[in-house]
Image (tube, grey):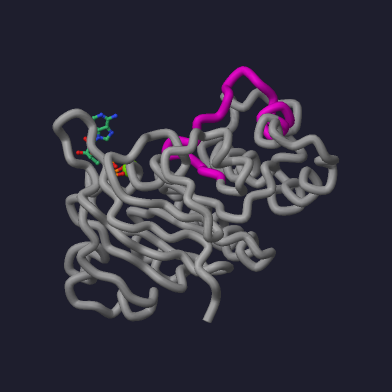
Amino acid sequence: MAETILSIKDLQVNYGGIEAVKGISFDVPQGSIVTLIGANGAGKSSTLRTVAGLVKPSSGSIRFMGEEITGKGPTDIVKKGITLVPEGRRIFADLSVLENLKIGAYLRKDDIREDLNWVYSLFPRLKERAWQAGGTLSGGEQQMLAVGRALMSRPKLMMMDEPSLGLAPIVVRDIFNIIREINKRGVTILLIEQNANMALQTADFGYVLETGRISLSGSGSALLTNEAVKKAYLGE
Ligand SMILES: Nc1ncnc2c1ncn2[C@@H]1O[C@H](COP(=O)(O)OP(=O)(O)OP(=O)(O)O)[C@@H](O)[C@H]1O
Ligand SMILES: [Mg+2]
């Protein structure tokens, strides 16, 4: 049994009067790929943004490697080893690919060359385009850059918010292969996806979020064959 790296208990997130996350609990085992699937507005991004310290929860607890991190700010969270590849990528459009990657490592004082080489080996395209402005990359290349930038912080846990959104099927396949490769290098992955099919094929474990609550959970393969999941999320 792998140790739990991230443990979420009764997490609630409100925006003013809107209850976006209504008391969810789940665990992410060290070294695993875990996916959260759910319809638009279910509270997926809110959950990740709260773990990343960008949103303060109204109640509940977030523990990372046994330590309570609830309410810590984003800089502290990155220092602990958690990174977020945000929805919509958020590339710095006017900065070069290399500058964008270096921003991912801004909290580190050690040598980043090894990490840069790793990112370039995962995404040779980024090496070719090191001097190109981030904003002029294609959608798929921007997603590679967002993942590469996140890796530059040397995360223990990488959270990804819809990495496949808007990408062509062949690029989606590449991105999922790379997620597996990053995971094999020891990075735990918490993945949000609308593409439930790919996500559940890739993940060890999945949770289904429905209007702020977890309605189902199970291994990726069990959820893939679950009738309710098939009907609601796999378009069958
Ligand atoms: N900053 C905010 N202020 C007010 N309401 C918000 C804010 N961010 C999210 N919400 C609301 O919280 C709910 C959950 O949103 P969230 O972005 O977490 O959903 P999601 O599951 O990621 O959806 P999607 O699949 O469309 O990205 C939605 O009803 C949304 O309108
Ligand atoms: Mg979202």
Along the viewing direction, whichever of 107 and 122 lies nearer the viewer: 107
Ligand 1 quadrant in view: top left
Q: The magenta stretch spans which residues?
A: 83-102
Task: Residue 108: name its quadrant.
Answer: top right
Is residue 48 rendered to the left or right of residue 92?
A: left
Within the magenta stretch, is there residue 124? no
Is residue 119 rendered to the left or right of residue 181?
A: right
Q: Residue at x 44, y 56 (%)?
A: 191
Along the viewing direction, whichever of 217 and 196 lies nearer the viewer: 217
Along the viewing direction, whichever of 172 and 84 lies nearer the viewer: 84
x and y, in percent, of residue 161 in the image: 43, 46
x and y, in percent, of residue 138 in the image: 55, 35
Regarding residue 98, the answer to whether it shows in the image is yes
Whether 86 is drawn above or below 94: the answer is below
Q: Residue at x 28, y 55 (%)?
A: 10
Which quarter of the rendered picture does the C terminus lie within? Answer: bottom left
Is residue 192 rendered to the left or right of residue 156?
A: left
Regarding residue 173, the answer to whether it shows in the image is no
Along the viewing direction, whichever of 109 and 219 lies nearer the viewer: 109
x and y, in percent, of residue 188 in the image: 56, 61
Whether 184 is drawn above or below 82: the answer is below
Q: Residue at x 23, y 37 (%)?
A: 14
Q: Residue at x 53, y 62 (%)?
A: 5
Is residue 148 rendered to the left or right of residue 2?
A: right
| Residue occupying the far left of the picture | 17
x and y, in percent, of residue 195 in the image: 36, 57
